[in-house]
Amino acid sequence: MPLYEYSCRLCDEGFEKLQPMSAAKTAECPACGQPAGRVLSMIAAPVRVGGGEEPSASSAPSAGACCGGACGCG
Ligand SMILES: [Zn+2]
């Protein structure tokens, strides 16, 4: 049976209560007796760490195979 968190809007009382999933989305406030609404638990969203860290592939200018004197094009 899941534990739900409730928050009373009238007296701002917060409490938790074990309720079956098929139960109503309200629970009686222990402080004022009014139906309190269920609070959805905040689930921490995954946070992206860092930025685009690209591997810096320094493309060295390829040494010209041609015009090196071996091919005789120049
Ligand atoms: Zn209340």
Image (cartoon, rainbow, N blue to C red):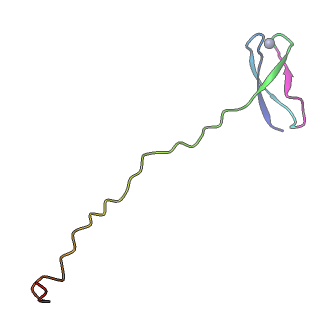
- Height in image: 12 above or below 55? above
Q: Quadrant of residue 57?
A: bottom left
**Ligand 1 image-quadrant field:** top right
Q: Residue drawn 9% across and 85% down?
A: 69
**Image coordinates for residue 5, horizontal then vertical, percent:** 75, 27
**In which quadrant of the rendered image does the C terminus lie?**
bottom left
**Image coordinates for residue 56, horizontal then vertical, percent:** 31, 59
- Height in image: 38 above or below 8? below
As drawn, is 38 to the left or to the right of 65? right
Q: Quadrant of residue 60?
A: bottom left
Along the line of sight, the residue nearer the viewer: 49 or 73: 73
**Image coordinates for residue 51, horizontal then vertical, percent:** 42, 47
Q: Is the magenta stretch mostly helix, strand or loop?
A: loop
Looking at the image, the residue that sits furthest to the front is 74
Residue bounds of the magenta highlight: 22-30
Q: Residue drawn 50% across and 45% down?
A: 48
**Image coordinates for residue 20, horizontal then vertical, percent:** 87, 36
Q: Residue drawn 83% across and 16% down?
A: 29
- Height in image: 70 above or below 62? below
**In which quadrant of the rendered image does the N terminus lie?**
top right
As drawn, is 30 to the left or to the right of 53? right
